[in-house]
């Protein structure tokens, strides 16, 4: 008789200490009372009341109690979840002690609701608990599941994506049979030799290795959750004999299938639910749940709300900190259509600053034989200065990459081969500065921003990486002109490069020169490094930027590396220029919401990006094609354009701001209110390709 497979089970815990152990099922530890230290591999986390974290499959972990505790363990069935998700790669980054995300509150509320029904595990209570289990796991997969950023899995075209899916579907449908590479090749009308190399390139495994992984996945599930004998399990999952199954199992798990079944049953027996030993624990649990219920009583959803303010209480503000856009490569401003659209944005939306890069391009300003020629660059800067637009000059060599998915853009972040040697860079930059002084004057340059991007080829993660030497040369050269000139770097990817921050900030702290401002790119993407592998995912955190910046500031404070200013030099909810939401009213709402949220949170923001014309493709026949620009190539003003138009109408004094609006005044009886109806992105958005997103993926 087969054992019942539940997606989740939970137990109350109050033991003083648990020995080191590991298991394949996922486990959430939720601390209700006291203090708890958890060791997961080499990392240690301190949980206080209300904290929780998720322990991934096969991670060694142990608990040490600092005080008497009451908590809960929530065990998620790995195999059942893998079937639902269609992948055996299940990894989560869910840890309230080391991360900030609005979704933690949602998960915490669900865990509390489960605990409310702790004593209702039978009949209708069981049905209700199962509903809560599935809703909890849905929240976890939507907000905290990550996947490996592995270049082997990149699809260069939609044809590749279709073919890989065909391979996966064929093997999943036929793994119980005796199939071969030749059988699959015939199905796909390909040669066996070509298909073998194709599978190795895209899966990182041979055909037989991948087939064996699928067979083992299902076999292990039957081994643990059924009473079938080993021979039946072997034959039912495509193995010709129990001996072949035994060998394949030993190669992966290091033990015989029978030994594994026995060990798992012993572990299951040791994980019986903890029943509170006395009425005091029972009463405390119920008291805690009642307190949580009263404290977090959900408000009824309303289609409207009332905001009451005191118009006499005002706070001075200047919204110019968010009225900046990225235009792109500096020399794109030589084109009349780009100039006219930039001026249109300045006049209508109040855009006051323009960020450009690749100023020192070999194509336009430097030749090894002829030397420097800044004629075309001067035309670009003349246009900005004459039209009272502040130049934000990125001095590095940025790539011109626009892919469909965040994973691929971040992974392929690289320069285009125009990095100069240090002596050449010194010579070019000093001549550039002399040109700027003579043409625009020191006073004008003091209004500009100078930034140096962290190209991977400059190895900023290394103690003596070339980046620091180059940055210090740029810094000293500009500061020798005027100490008021603002110099910063290094364009980190917020959230995604979090694992690099600590090492880099520690390196930079030891240097004699610190930046005037730190710059970050924000595209709502996060990553976790584990076992020398990077795992990443889109984030649907409603307050992503604010939460990620809080983590950055906490890290800087711990290290003792603090800079006066923080800039978000590129920001959008996506890095893709083929996402239909970029053209929607949702994008306008997102912009207004972000500008309101980030008041007093950041010192400067530059929106990504201004013009669709900058990232045109050969496939850009449609009037709108999901580009993140504010004006289409045909001059159509998009919702993002009008979002900045609204922001530009705000008056200089803030009376109040909340989740959905901001109220401003000028002190003379005039008031301007800007509202938005931003809708959080749904789980469907997380798991879809960027260019296949549909409007209904809004939550």
Image (cartoon, rainbow, N blue to C red):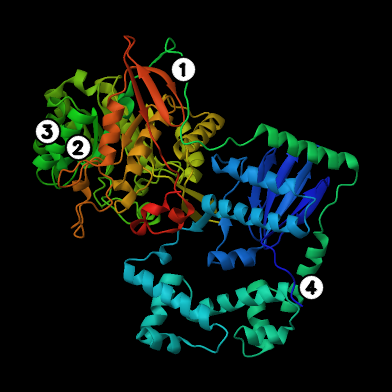
| Camera-nearest residue between 241 and 378 | 241
User: What label does residue 309 carry, if any?
Assistant: 1
Crowding at label 3, few (<14), some or many (≥20) Cα neighbours within 10 Å? some
Q: Earlier in the sequence, mark 3 or mark 1?
A: 1
Q: Name the spot of residue 336 as percent of width and height, x first.
A: 9, 40
User: What label does residue 378 carry, if any?
Assistant: 3
Quadrant into which the N terminus falls:
bottom right
Q: CA distance from mark 3 to mark 4?
A: 76 Å
Observer-side mark, 3 or 2, equals 3
Q: CA distance from mark 3 to mark 1?
A: 50 Å
At a point 82% along the width and 64% down the height, the residue shown is 269
Q: CA distance from mark 3 to mark 2?
A: 15 Å
Residue that badge 2 annotates: 428
Residue that badge 4 annotates: 262
Q: Earlier in the sequence, mark 2 or mark 4?
A: 4
Q: Earlier in the sequence, mark 3 or mark 2?
A: 3
Label 3 sits on a secondary structure element that is helix
Q: CA distance from mark 1 to mark 2?
A: 56 Å
Q: Is residue 389 above or below residue 504?
A: above
């Amino acid at each position: 008789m087969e054992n019942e497979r539940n997606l989740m089970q939970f137990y109350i815990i109050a033991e003083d200490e648990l020995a080191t152990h590991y298991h394949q099922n996922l486990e959430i530890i939720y601390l209700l009372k006291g203090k708890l230290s958890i060791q997961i591999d080499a990392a240690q986390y301190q949980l206080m009341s209300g904290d929780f974290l998720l322990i991934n499959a096969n991670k060694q972990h142990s608990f040490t109690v600092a005080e008497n505790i009451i908590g809960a363990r929530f065990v998620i069935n790995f195999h059942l979840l893998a079937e639902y998700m269609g992948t055996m790669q299940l990894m989560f980054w869910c840890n309230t002690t080391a991360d900030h995300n609005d979704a933690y509150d949602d998960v915490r509320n669900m865990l509390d609701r489960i605990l409310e029904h702790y004593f209702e595990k039978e009949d209708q209570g069981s049905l209700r608990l199962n509903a809560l289990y599935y809703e909890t796991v849905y929240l976890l997969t939507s907000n905290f599941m990550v996947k490996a950023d592995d270049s082997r899995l990149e699809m260069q075209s939609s044809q590749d994506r279709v073919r890989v899916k065909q391979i996966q579907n064929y093997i999943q449908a036929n793994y119980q049979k005796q199939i071969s590479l030749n059988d699959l090749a015939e199905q796909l009308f390909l040669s066996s030799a070509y298909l073998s190399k194709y599978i190795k390139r895209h899966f990182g495994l041979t055909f037989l290795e991948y087939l064996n992984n699928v067979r083992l996945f299902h076999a292990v599930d039957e081994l643990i959750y059924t009473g079938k004998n080993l021979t039946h399990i072997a034959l039912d999952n495509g193995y010709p004999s129990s001996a072949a199954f035994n060998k394949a199992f030993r190669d992966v798990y290091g033990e015989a299938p029978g030994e594994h079944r026995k060990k798992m049953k012993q572990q299951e027996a040791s994980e019986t639910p903890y029943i509170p030993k006395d009425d005091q624990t029972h009463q405390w649990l119920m008291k805690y749940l009642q307190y949580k219920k009263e404290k977090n009583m959900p408000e009824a959803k309303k289609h409207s709300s009332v905001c009451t303010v005191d118009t006499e209480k005002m706070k001075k503000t200047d919204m110019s900190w968010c009225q900046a856009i990225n235009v792109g490569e500096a020399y794109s401003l030589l084109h009349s259509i780009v100039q006219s659209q930039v001026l249109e944005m300045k006049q209508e939306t109040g855009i006051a600053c323009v960020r450009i890069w690749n100023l020192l391009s070999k194509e336009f300003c430097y030749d090894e034989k002829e030397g420097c020629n800044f004629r075309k660059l001067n035309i670009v800067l003349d246009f900005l200065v004459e039209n009272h637009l502040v130049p934000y000059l990125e001095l590095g060599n940025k790539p011109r990459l626009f892919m469909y998915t965040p994973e691929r853009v971040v992974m392929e972040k690289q320069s285009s081969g125009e990095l100069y040697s240090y002596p050449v860079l010194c010579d070019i930059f000093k001549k550039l500065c002399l040109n700027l002084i003579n043409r625009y004057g020191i006073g004008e340059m003091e209004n500009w921003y100078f930034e140096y991007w962290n190209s991977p080829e400059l190895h900023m993660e290394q103690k003596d990486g070339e980046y620091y030497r180059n940055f210090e040369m740029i810094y000293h050269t500009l500061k020798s002109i005027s100490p008021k000139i603002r110099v910063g770097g290094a364009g980190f990817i917020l959230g995604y490069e979090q694992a690099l921050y600590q090492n880099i900030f520690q390196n930079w702290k030891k240097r004699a020169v610190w930046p005037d401002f730190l710059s970050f790119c924000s595209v709502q993407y996060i990553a976790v490094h584990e076992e020398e592998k990077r795992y990443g995912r889109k984030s649907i955190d409603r307050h992503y930027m604010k939460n990620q910046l809080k983590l950055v500031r906490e890290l800087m404070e711990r290290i003792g590396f603090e800079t006066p200013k923080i800039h978000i030099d590129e920001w959008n909810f996506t890095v893709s220029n083929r996402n239909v939401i970029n053209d929607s009213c949702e994008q306008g709402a997102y912009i207004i919401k972000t500008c309101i949220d980030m008041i007093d949170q950041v010192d400067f923001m530059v929106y990504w990006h201004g013009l669709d014309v900058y990232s045109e493709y050969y496939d850009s026949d449609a009037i709108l094609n999901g580009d993140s620009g504010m004006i289409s190539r045909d001059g159509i003003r998009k919702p993002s354009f009008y979002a900045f138009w609204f922001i530009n109408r705000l008056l200089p004094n803030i009376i109040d701001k909340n989740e959905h609006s901001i109220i401003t005044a000028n002190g003379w009886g005039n008031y301007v209110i800007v509202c938005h109806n931003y809708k959080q992105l749904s789980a469907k958005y997380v798991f879809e390709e960027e260019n296949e997103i549909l409007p209904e993926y809004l939550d």
